[in-house]
Each structure stands twice: as structure tokens, then as C-alpha cells.
Image: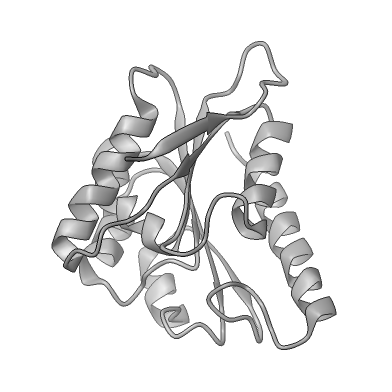
């Protein structure tokens, strides 16, 4: 069963609800999701972080399960929704695209055709972030989806390199790109 943590609301009239969806082994407390959530909060969004123990399912069942987790995390919220998802959480693209949710896809699973197809048909704004050393990142596929793209040279699936300082710098680069994306949001 998933758990939700609502971050303290800094804005009495939030822009909407930003839902942080983790990866298989990458909780919302890890850098990419934490910093993306902090930017969302700074820009006036209410932030809900999801934690889960993802079951071992085939890809179609996983897509259904992750979409259901997003739906449950949103609950009865009736307003603007932003999905911020990492890796496994990007399987929520199928559900998100049905509702035209804006999304930030961190190291998206671009090797999964249904995820790519959903991102491609999503009418919401999208930011895709991936690293050149990530085996599931494919810049050519990302370009077919549309939206904004940030490609980080030398970064793996966790947005790390073998150098700790460079890895920290990469996270700063991604956080800045996310902040810029928010600044251009209607």
C-alpha cells in the first residue's frame, strides 16, 4: 500500500497539486524528486510525495498499477495537477495523458512503447530529463514526444557519474532546468 506525505503549504492559494511519483528503488526523498518538489513548492504548488513498494508485475500490469497509484494520490483533489515522476513512476504517463496533466518526467522509461505513446499524445506541458549514460534514455525518442527536453551528458539512470562533485553539479543543473520550466508555465 502506498503512503502519501503532503509537504507544508507555503501558498494559501496553491497553483495546484504536484504529485511526486518514485522509481522502483528511488524514493521521493532522493535528490531528483526532492529538488523537483522543492521547486514546485517554491513556485506555489501543493506537493504530495508518494512512497510505495512496487510489486513485480509485467509491463502492462505495471502501467495499470502506477496509473492507479497516481489516481489514488490525487484523490478528490479538484484542480490543476502536475505529475513529477522518476523512472517507474513515468509509467503514469498513460493515466496522465488521458487527463492532459502537465508532467516532469525524470529518467523516463523511453524503451516502453506504451509510455512513449502516452507521452506523445499528452496535451499537457511536459519536461523530459535524461542522461546520456542511462540505458533507457534515447534522445531521438524524446524528440518525437515533444515538450521540453534536458539531456545531461555523462549522467546515468540515477543522474550520477563516477565523480561525486560532478554528480552534485548535475543535480544543480537539473534543478535549474526545472525551475526555468516552471517560470515559463502559463
Inspect this view and state whether residue 125 appears. Answer: no
The x and y percentages for residue 105 are 47, 57
**Taking the image as drawn, is residue 141 in sight?**
yes
Say which residue appears at 70% left-offset and 17% top-offset: 11
Residue 37 on image: x %, y %: 63, 42
**Quarter that holds the C terminus:** top right
Q: Height in image: 145 above or below 92?
A: below
Q: Nearer the viewer, residue 28 or 78?
A: 28
Task: Determine the residue located farthest toward the right in the rendered image.
Answer: 165
Instruction: Tell me the residue at 63%/81% (across/down).
Output: 155
On screen, residue 41 versus residue 121, left or right, reads right
Figure label count? 0
Q: Of 111 and 69, which appears nearest the observer?
A: 69
Q: Quadrant of residue 143?
A: bottom left
Give the left or right position of residue 10, taking residue 139 as reference.
right
- Which residue: 34% across, 39% down? 70
Question: Quick check: 80 above or below 141?
Answer: above
Horizontal placement of 119 versus 83: left or right?
A: left
| Above or below 7: residue 138 | below
- Say if 83 sits above or below 57 in the image: above
- Give x and y (percent) for residue 73: 38, 32
Closer to us: 46 or 58: 58
The residue under the point 43% across, 66% down is 108
Q: Position of residue 129 (x, y in %)?
A: 55, 66
Query: In the shown orientation, is residue 36 left or right of residue 134?
Result: right
Amino acid at each position: 500500500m502506498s503512503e502519501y506525505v503532503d509537504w507544508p503549504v507555503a501558498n494559501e492559494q496553491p497553483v495546484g497539486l504536484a504529485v511526486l511519483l518514485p522509481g522502483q528503488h528511488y524514493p521521493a526523498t532522493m535528490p531528483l524528486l526532492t529538488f523537483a518538489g522543492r521547486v514546485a513548492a517554491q513556485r506555489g504548488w501543493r506537493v504530495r510525495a508518494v512512497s510505495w513498494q512496487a510489486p513485480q508485475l509485467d509491463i502492462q500490469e505495471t502501467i495499470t498499477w502506477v496509473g492507479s497509484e497516481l489516481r489514488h494520490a490525487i484523490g478528490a483533489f479538484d484542480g490543476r495537477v502536475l505529475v513529477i515522476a522518476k523512472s517507474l513512476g513515468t509509467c503514469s504517463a498513460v493515466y496522465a495523458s488521458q487527463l492532459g496533466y502537465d508532467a516532469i518526467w525524470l529518467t523516463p522509461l523511453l524503451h516502453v512503447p506504451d509510455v512513449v505513446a502516452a507521452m506523445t499524445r499528452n496535451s499537457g506541458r511536459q519536461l523530459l530529463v535524461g542522461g546520456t549514460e542511462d540505458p533507457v534514455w534515447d534522445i531521438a525518442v524524446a524528440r518525437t514526444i515533444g515538450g521540453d527536453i534536458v539531456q545531461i551528458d555523462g549522467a546515468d539512470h540515477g543522474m550520477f557519474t563516477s565523480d561525486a562533485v560532478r554528480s552534485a553539479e548535475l543535480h544543480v543543473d537539473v534543478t535549474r532546468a526545472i525551475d526555468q520550466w516552471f517560470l515559463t508555465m502559463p
